[in-house]
C-alpha cells in the first residue's frame, strides 16, 4: 500500500509506504519514471536519446557551500541573482540550487558544525526569496548520483588540465604558475581538493544544466565542465549539453576592513563583513568603522581610494544608480554622510531577510526538513534519468 507524498503547495512528489513507520514517519520510496510527468522532470532525454540540446528547455543550476549564514558579498554576487533568475524564468525553465556539502569536505569539518551550517544555509536561501515550490533546493550529499558521476568523469578528466586550474593553488596559497612538481604542492595537496572541479562538473552535468550563473572568477571552472562534457559526448554519444555561463552583473564586494580583498568569512576581523542576519545596529557599527582614507569628498577611484570606492559600489547595488552617478550627488558630502546613507540602505534591504531567516530557524514544525526532503526527491529523480543513460552507454 502506498500513499501520495505532495509538495508544499500540494503537488505530487512521490509515494510513501504507509505500513512501515520510521521514527513516526513513513519511508519514502524512490521515484518511478512514469510518475514524473506531473513534475516536469523529463526535460532532456524524454522518450528518445537522440533529442538535441538546442530543443531542450533551459535548466539552470548553481551551488553554494554550507558556511553558515552568508555575507553581503555572497548575497549581492550570487543569491540575489538566483532569485532574479527564478522570478524572471519562463514556466518551462527548470531551476536547481544545491547546498554543496560534499565540496565542504575538502577542508576538515566538525560534524555538528557542518550540520548546523547546512540548515542555516537552507534557511537563508528561502529567506532571500527562493521558492521551494518553484526551485529545487537540496543538499548535494542527499543525491548520490553526484558522487557516482564524479567518479565516472574522473576516468576521463585530464591531470594536465586539472593541474592548471587555480582552485587548489589559491586554497593552498600558492602562485598561479606553480606546478605539481612544487614541494609544497606535493606535501599539502589532497586528491579531493585537486579534483574539486570534477565534482563541480558532475554537479552541473548530472542535472543536464544548460546554464550556470557564475561570477567572472568562476568562468574557468565552467569551461572545464564544458570540456569534460564534450570529451564524454565524443567518446560515448550525445548525453550532456554544454553548459553556458550566466555571468553575474554584480561587482565583487570587498572587505570593509581591507578593501583590496574580497569580503570573506575567513578574514580575522568580523567587522570586515556584513552577515545577512546582522541587526541594524551591527550594520551601523561595521560600516561606521569601514576603512576609507583621510581625503576630503567622495570620488570613485578603486585603485587610489579602494575603501571609498567599495562603499560606493555597495550603495550602487541597492540604490540602482552607477557609482559615477552617485559621485555626482555625494562628491561634496562627508564620508560620514556617505556611510550613514549606506547604513540605511543596507539595513532596510536586509531587515526582511533577517526576519524571515529567524522565523525559519525558530520553526519547530519541521518545515526546513520538509523542504530539503522535497528537494532531494526531485533532484534524485532528475539525476537518475541522466545516470541511467550514462550507465547504459558505458555498459554498466
Image (cartoon, helix red, strand yellow):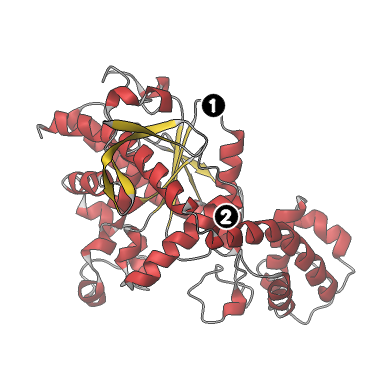
Q: Quadrant of residue 228?
A: top left
59 lies left or right of 177: right
**Tag 2 and tag 1, C-beta contact below 8 Å:** no
Check disc 1 and report its element: helix, strand or loop: loop
Q: Which residue is mark 1?
A: 91
Q: Residue 2 lies in what quarter of the image?
A: top left
Classify mark 2: helix, strand or loop: helix
Q: Residue furthest front?
A: 19
Residue drawn at (20%, 72%), measured in percent from left and top? Answer: 186
Image coords of residue 205 (percent x, y): 32, 39
Distance from disc 2 to disc 1, alpha carbons, whole Å, reads 25 Å
Q: Residue at x 42, y 24 (%)?
A: 38
Q: Which disc is residue 77 wearing?
A: 2
Which residue occupies the foreground of this view, 214 or 328?
A: 214
Residue nearest the observer in this picture, 19 or 343: 19
From this view, report whether residue 181 is shown above or below residue 318.
Answer: below
- Judge from the rendering whether residue 155 lies leftward or rightward of residue 241; answer left or right: left
Determine if residue 215 is in view.
yes
- Image coordinates for residue 89, horizontal then vertical, percent: 57, 32
Instruction: State the quadrant of the C terminus.
Output: top left
Q: Give the left or right position of residue 76, taking residue 138 as reference.
A: right
* As drawn, 282 above or below 42: below
- 13 versus 291 height, above or below: above
**Residue 170 appears in the picture as rendered:** no
The number of numbered discs placed on residues in the rendered structure image is 2
Amino acid at each position: 500500500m502506498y500513499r501520495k507524498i505532495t509538495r508544499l503547495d500540494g503537488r505530487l512528489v512521490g509515494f510513501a509506504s504507509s505500513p512501515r513507520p520510521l521514527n513516526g514517519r513513513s519511508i519514502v520510496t524512490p521515484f518511478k519514471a512514469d510518475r514524473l510527468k506531473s513534475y516536469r522532470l523529463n526535460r532532456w532525454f524524454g522518450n528518445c536519446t537522440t533529442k538535441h540540446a538546442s530543443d531542450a528547455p533551459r535548466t539552470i543550476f548553481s551551488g553554494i557551500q554550507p558556511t553558515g549564514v552568508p555575507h553581503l558579498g555572497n548575497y549581492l554576487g550570487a543569491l540575489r541573482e538566483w532569485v532574479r533568475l527564478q522570478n524572471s524564468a519562463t514556466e518551462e525553465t527548470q531551476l536547481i540550487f544545491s547546498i554543496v556539502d560534499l565540496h565542504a569536505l575538502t577542508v576538515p569539518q566538525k560534524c555538528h558544525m557542518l550540520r548546523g551550517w547546512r540548515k542555516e544555509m537552507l534557511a537563508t536561501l528561502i529567506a532571500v526569496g527562493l521558492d521551494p515550490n518553484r526551485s529545487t533546493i537540496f543538499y548535494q550529499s542527499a543525491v548520490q548520483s553526484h558522487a557516482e558521476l564524479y567518479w565516472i568523469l574522473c576516468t576521463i578528466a585530464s591531470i594536465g588540465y586539472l593541474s592548471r586550474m587555480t582552485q587548489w593553488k589559491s586554497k593552498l596559497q600558492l602562485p598561479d604558475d606553480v606546478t605539481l612538481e612544487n614541494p609544497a604542492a606535493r606535501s599539502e595537496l589532497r586528491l579531493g581538493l585537486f579534483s574539486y572541479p570534477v565534482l563541480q562538473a558532475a554537479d552541473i552535468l548530472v542535472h543536464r544544466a544548460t546554464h550556470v550563473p557564475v561570477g567572472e572568477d568562476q568562468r574557468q571552472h565552467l569551461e572545464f565542465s564544458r570540456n569534460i562534457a564534450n570529451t564524454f559526448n565524443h567518446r560515448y554519444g550525445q548525453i550532456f549539453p554544454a553548459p553556458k555561463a550566466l555571468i553575474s552583473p554584480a561587482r565583487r564586494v570587498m572587505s570593509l576592513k581591507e578593501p583590496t580583498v574580497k569580503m570573506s568569512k575567513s578574514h580575522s576581523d568580523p567587522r570586515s563583513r556584513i552577515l545577512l542576519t546582522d541587526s541594524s545596529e551591527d550594520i551601523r557599527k561595521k560600516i561606521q568603522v569601514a576603512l576609507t582614507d583621510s581625503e576630503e569628498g567622495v570620488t570613485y577611484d578603486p585603485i587610489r581610494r579602494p575603501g571609498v570606492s567599495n562603499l560606493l559600489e555597495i550603495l550602487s547595488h541597492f540604490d540602482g544608480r552607477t557609482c559615477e552617478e552617485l559621485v555626482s550627488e555625494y562628491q561634496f558630502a562627508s564620508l560620514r554622510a556617505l556611510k550613514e546613507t549606506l547604513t540605511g540602505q543596507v539595513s532596510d534591504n536586509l531587515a526582511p531577510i533577517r526576519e524571515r531567516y529567524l522565523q525559519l530557524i525558530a520553526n519547530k514544525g519541521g518545515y526546513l526538513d520538509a523542504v530539503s526532503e522535497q528537494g532531494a526527491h526531485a533532484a534524485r529523480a532528475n539525476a537518475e534519468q541522466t545516470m541511467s543513460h550514462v550507465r547504459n552507454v558505458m555498459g554498466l
